[in-house]
Image (cartoon, helix red, strand yellow):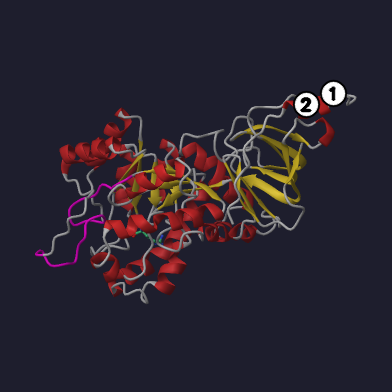
Amino acid sequence: MLLRRSLPLVVATACAAFASAAETPVPASPLSITYIRAGRVIDPASGQVLTNQVIVIEGDKIKSIGPDDTNAALLPPNTKIVDLRQATVLPGLIDCHTHITSQPENYYTDIFRKSPIDVAITAHVYARRTLLAGFTTVRDVGAGEYTDIALKRAIDSGKVAGPRIFPAALTLGATGGHVDLTGFSPSISFKDMSGVADGVDAVRSRVRQNIKFGAEWIKVAATAGVLSEEESVGAPQYSELEMHTAVEEAAMWGKKVAAHAHGTEGIKRAIRAGVASIEHASFIDDEGIALAKERGTWLVMDIYNDDYILSEFARMGYPEKIIEKERLVGRTQRENFQKAHRAGVKMAFGTDAGVYPHGWNGKQFRHMVQWGMTPMQAIQAATVNAAELLNQKGKLGAIATGAHADLIAVKGDPLADVTVLENIDFVMKGGEIVKDQLARQPVKTFD
Ligand code: ARG
């Protein structure tokens, strides 16, 4: 269900109707005003829970938050009141590792029978599911043919429902590595655009191409991977120099780099090269953990993925060697998540959605809690921490004056049971209610 916000009406007569009120009402604003009356608010910035708050939304931003002493008679005309007094309100969630434009159906069909147009034409479905799952922002770390950029534009212009997207376009990687299509006959060639870039000049050029066409992040494959056919899962695939070049070049354009890295050595190379975040980080060792702490490098660890890959990927025709690689990674990654978190490494929420079905992003919370985080810490990873990684501190992942009005609400208490975040009841993005399943009075407009 997608509810459209009604356009603000500035009706002068409505102001006149208040003239006789004991106190002078606030004059009408040219922007729409929404008062969200929240029973409980989880404030990730302070780690506190506030009760009986009112969040005032003006246009697409949060104007204020404070104790709820709402007196309807004193509100400006056309104020919309949303009664969430029985619910818990949080900032919209952020997933720092998605591939929102696609999701796997069958290994060979996906490779041989789908064109980039097939991908592009269905991407909006996944964007909508992601948004309705409460994820109002994603960093999308790798898509073919600039489909992520096109999707972002369609969302930003209001044509398609979806989260805010920070796109990375084509992932950079080595020939024969994680982003190359390996395992097939050398006679088969694909005409798709490729992020394969060997050596510093090619890396520079690929970074520039990506940014030219709209990438806001650069993604590099520092090591081998699971869902690709090269033998090892963790072998380094880029030199430190190549990654340093990507970091330096991206910085020249005001961008940062995220590195796919499962392997111990590749993780350290990427950190030393200056990437902002390590994705997966499965085989990070003590030295890597110390290095990440020292350099302030974020870890974005997709610790839900293992469940889905092991239960579904054989059915989808993935080669046994890929499934075997997942068996090597899964549990160790979770243990290392716990270790790195205990050591105090900065952690941001990222799931690799698009490996599993879009909209299931919230399923990772339970694993983060099972492997050592408190529910509040897991929520912080998906709000304040993620916003900091994205250079959006105070603007996203926050309920504060001036922040984007991206809010979610649930009936239950996520701090008591974090799995309530798997089903979000209410979603607002940029001041617009896009989902509302709470059993209560319909949204009221006071005018
Ligand atoms: N995209 C990743 C890769 O192919 C998925 C890894 C998923 N496994 C995991 N345990 N996180 O390498």
Residue wearing tag 2: 15
In the image, residue 135 lies in the stretch drawn in magenta: no
Specify whether 233 is left or right of 443.
left
Judge the density around disc 1: few (<14), some (14-19), many (≥20) Cα neighbours within 10 Å: few
Residue type pointed to by label 2 = Cys
Residue sitting at 39 percent across and 39 percent down? 276
Residue wearing tag 1: 19
Q: Is residue 127 above or below residue 294?
A: below
- The quarter in which the N terminus is drawn is bottom right
Q: Position of residue 241 (x, y in %)?
A: 22, 39
Name which quarter of the figure residue 353 lies in.
bottom left
**389 or 206, nearer to the observer:** 206
Extreme right residue here? Answer: 22
Q: Which residues are magenta?
A: 169-187
Q: Is residue 178 above or below residue 45?
A: below
Judge the density around disc 2: few (<14), some (14-19), many (≥20) Cα neighbours within 10 Å: some
Q: Is residue 328 above or below residue 440?
A: below
In the image, residue 184 lies in the stretch drawn in magenta: yes
Q: Which mark, by number, is residue 141?
A: none
Q: Is residue 174 above or below residue 102?
A: above
**361 or 225, nearer to the observer:** 361
Q: Is residue 421 visible?
A: yes
Ligand 1 resides in the quarter of the picture at bottom left
Name which quarter of the figure residue 64 lies in.
top right
- The quarter in which the C terminus is drawn is top right
Q: Cβ of disc 1 within 8 Å of ligand 1?
A: no
Q: Is residue 71 visible?
A: no
Marks 1 and 2 close (CB-CB < 8 Å) = yes
Residue sitting at 27 percent across and 35 percent down? 212
